[in-house]
Amino acid sequence: MKAPKRKIKPEKRTKPKLAVIKFTSCDGCQLSLLDAEDALLDVADAVEIAYFVEARDRRLPGPYDVTLVEGSISMPEHIEQIQEIREQSKFLIAIGACATAGGIQALRNWRNVDDFVRMVYAHPEYIDTLETSTPISEYVQVDFELRGCPINKHQLLDVVTSLLIGKQPRTPTYSVCMECKRRGTPCVMVSKGVPCLGPVTQAGCNAICPSVNRGCFGCYGPMEAPNTESLGQHLLDIGAAPGEVVRLFRNFSGYAEDFRLASDAFEEMMA
Amino acid sequence: MTTLRIDVPYMARVEGEGALNIIVEDGEIKHLELNIFEPPRFFEAFLRGRHFMEAPDITARICGICPVAYQMSSSHAIEKILGVQISPEIRALRRLLYCAEWIESHALHIYLLHAPDFLGYESAISMAADPALRPAVEMGLRMKKIGNDLLALIGGREIHPLSPTVGGFYRAPTRKELLALKPELEWGLEASIKTVAWTATLDFPDFEPDYELVSLRHPDEYPMNEGRVVSNLGLDIPMEAFEEHFIDDHVPHSNAVHVYHRDHGSYLTGPLARLNLNLDKLTPLAKQALEETGHQFPSRNPFKSIVARAVEVVLAYEEALRIIDAYVRPEPSRIEAEPRAGWGCHITEAPRGMLYHRYELDDQGLILSCRIDAPTAQNLKRMEDDLWAFVPQVLALPHDEATLRCEQLVRNYDPCISCATHFLKLNVVEK
């Protein structure tokens, strides 16, 4: 998580300008803003929603005080576009697993993208795409990252509110395990032997998966300094197949460095 | 020579990235294209080698607005391969979950994305700034929130729920948890009936193209998770025959792969088609609300999709309340499935129409291949055909208004471009 470099000071007369930008994604993270039904109109009163194509026709030019960027960089034209957006943004927040780790579509990064194109399209020659799907931070400086597939709308509102009052936004960097303890959810790995990425995954979702009797699949990406090797070994010890361990790490945030190295290491072990 | 260009480089109030380009010379359409520049993500490719239990989680990520649809179609298709029989209690809970998604998705479209077209606003945000309209926007947001609350209770969260899976649910809610939502659902039912009445007062352009309407049809209920594929032109086939009748076409001059019916070309799927083909399956209050509009259904006017959507919200609230009243917590919440090789397909009714999934598994339970036909991919050809028929009607209008009318026509379909894009040939359009 990078520390924010710039701060937004609330101005007296004009409302801060918010932009919502989409790259390669499912729209779910920007939808989180529309899903904050109780707060949406308050947000619209407090900030100028200057650019949000999914929600409105009107588009105001930059610069923007806060820019939320959803999606990964996967097309040739994206590179120039994200640089321009960076220039137009005082405070740029990457939202969601696509923008912070390349998303599920980053699975292509382990394969030959031309093979993928041929599998899906009848006329592969028309498809012009980058070899990789990568996070926003691969190309420009990002001021803050909100993790998750999708992001948690309460975290999103917290971050936007923090910026409005001139406070540095914060999100937890500890693991999902802490949230299970706080909720009083019995450990699914200890009590049921269910493979779980909770011990190495960043908190923020309120440990929903274990609360419904399933293991965490790491959609918030790696926590700070995760011990993926030890966890992966433990998953093998409790009976997970090596392929399962690889797939678990190589998931919605699988291209985040710690998870990437882990899935590569366990894949090598299988070979 | 007079030339009219309708050029919308990045269409607002739709899910995903699309553009509209029309050139008319001397009253004749020379070029008409619905461009999709949404980047491809190759789901069918990277699903290969993944385990069947991951399919509902991964395919949900095709769409942030209708993830439940992907979880339903994939789970059913895989259950057919593995020979899993779900219990009546799980079946009822799935229908309840689908009701929740129809409510949140339809309320979003009616109030936040589509209503501004009819009322002359650029967005619901601007509508809400008008004191006369703010209550309507607030009502729409509350209706949507109730759907999302129900979805989050059953699914674990609103977007990309994590409890639904192959064989059922990782956790089923308790009866008490569901009953707690009843007062809000009852409010929502009332609000949805008012919504139908309100949509009926909108101004609809006179436009009734000759459609083939296609949807599921079930003998006992309004279709969501099960049924046969039927059309107003006499089609009546099992889901397994979908690929024989509906073809992916890669047209050279077009930027999109269009799904079309082998016998009749483009077709319409979604709320208007479902309603027209299942009028006799409406729940009592939904039926009454529709009758009181005074609008004649079946109707082939795509602008009236907003009425169909509103009627389906009434139905979804009514069904949700009925299911909750009769709810028995499934025990177990999930039927365990053992891997075995085979192939299976299934269609469910996503908010935007039929969603087809087909999988082939190996004996370890890993996916060998799959095909996914999203509703918007099926509707794209119909949208273009609609535009061909509609553009001559708007030529006399001022340019801005003509453009807006064409955009509105596309928004009638509630297009979900992220969904459609793993099929579409990409054409880069400058933003």
Image (tube, grey):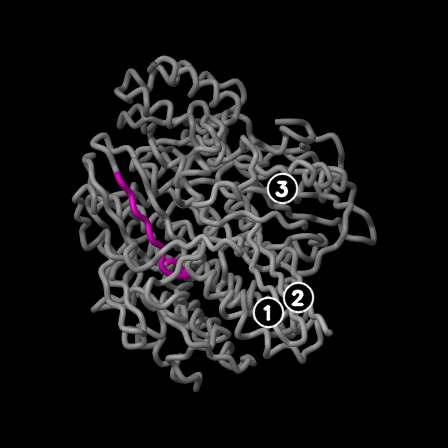
The crowding category of the residue bearing disc 3, from other C-alpha atoms within 10 Å (few below 14, some 14 to 19, many at least 20), is: many
Q: Which residue is mark 3?
A: A69
Instruction: Give above or below for B196 relative to A173.
Output: below
- Pair 3/2: label in front: 2
Q: Which mark is in front, 1 or 3?
A: 1
> Does residue A163 lie above or below B4 as drawn?
above
Q: Amino acid at mark 1?
A: Cys
Identify the residue under disc 1: B406
| Residue at image coords 56%, 63% | B113
Mark 3: which amino acid?
Val
Does residue B353 show up magenta in the picture? yes
Q: Observer-nearest residue: A169 or B175?
A: A169
* B406 up-or-down from B37: above or below: below
**CA distance for labels 3 and 2:** 29 Å
Name the secondary structure under disc 2: strand
Q: Which chain is home to disc 1?
A: B
Would you identify the image quadrant in which residue A65 lies? top right
Mark 1, other Cα within 10 Å: few <14 / some 14–19 / many ≥20: many
The secondary structure that most of the magenta stretch takes on is strand
> On the picture, is A161 further left or further right than A97?
right
Chain letter of disc 2?
B
Q: Residue B203: horizontal and vertical position, in percent?
A: 56, 81
Answer whether residue A89 is magenta in the image: no
State which quadrant residue B246 falls in.
Answer: bottom left
Res. B6 mark: 2
The kind of secondary structure element at disc 3 is strand
Q: Tags 2 and 1 in contact by the CB under 8 Å rule?
A: yes
Tag 1 secondary structure: helix
